[in-house]
Image (tube, helix red, strand yellow):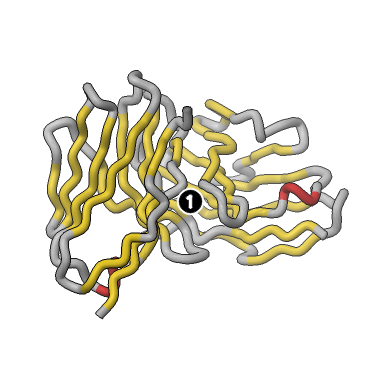
Amino acid sequence: EPEVTQTPSHQVTQMGQEVILRCVPISNHLYFYWYRQILGQKVEFLVSFYNNEISEKSEIFDDQFSVERPDGSNFTLKIRSTKLEDSAMYFCASGRDRYEQYFGPGTRLTVT
Amino acid sequence: RKEVEQDPGPFNVPEGATVAFNCTYSNSASQSFFWYRQDCRKEPKLLMSVYSSGNEDGRFTAQLNRASQYISLLIRDSKLSDSATYLCVVSFNTDKLIFGTGTRLQVFP
């Protein structure tokens, strides 16, 4: 059964550094997403991406965040200058259509 | 009022029991409804979509009441492997999924 994959599984970075989180969505999916979950809290939407552009983004997704689909398979989330409060689990998700989304295993980001 | 509200639990039930979770949502324009399960420190996994007529998948039954803005999940014949957090999720005709905080279920032998 095809799955969304994410790398790395855990990233530790210092405040102010740039990080890139990587995702390989399921191959025939067209819709791509990033969510995050701060420890002990609910899953929160960050951004959706379709047809090589952002279709929707949340208030969390400010100028420090960007997404890219650099080739036919990868989907990346970049945080330009990390803050302590960016520490969270970041989940990539993909879907064949706009309704059912399948999540990757997540990247745990720790900002020190 | 929270967009999606769930009783956090935990619900502690013996194997074989039937357990039901409820969820309410605030936006009457919500159009898509789902139940996901999440194991500790893992990703949410789609359990089932919820349709207006209600739907069943094996031991799991989901119901939607649009008038009351209420979704339910019933699990029959609970297994130890059902222990997880169950997330109620809605969307308002956009891609954005809105998650509840989840209801924790612990099934004991």
Q: Which residue is mark 1?
A: A25
Q: Judge whether residue B82 can be spotted in this image.
A: yes
Quarter containing the C terminus of chain A: bottom right
Along the viewing direction, whichever of B60 and B72 lies nearer the viewer: B72
Would residue B48 be found to the left or right of residue B93 on screen? left
Q: With respect to residue A68, does B20 lie above or below?
A: below
Quarter containing the N terminus of chain A: bottom left
Q: Judge whether residue A1 can be spotted in this image.
A: no
Total marks shown come to 1
Label 1 environment density (alpha carbons within 10 Å; few <14, some 14–19, many ≥20): many
| Picture coordinates of residue B32, whole percent (x, y) | 31, 31
Q: Which residue shows up at 85% across the image and 53% down it?
A: A15
Q: Which residue shows up at 50% across the image and 30% down it?
A: A51
Q: Amino acid at mark 1?
A: Pro
| Picture coordinates of residue A14, whole percent (x, y) | 85, 58
Along the viewing direction, whichever of B53 and A66 lies nearer the viewer: B53
Quadrant of res B85: bottom left
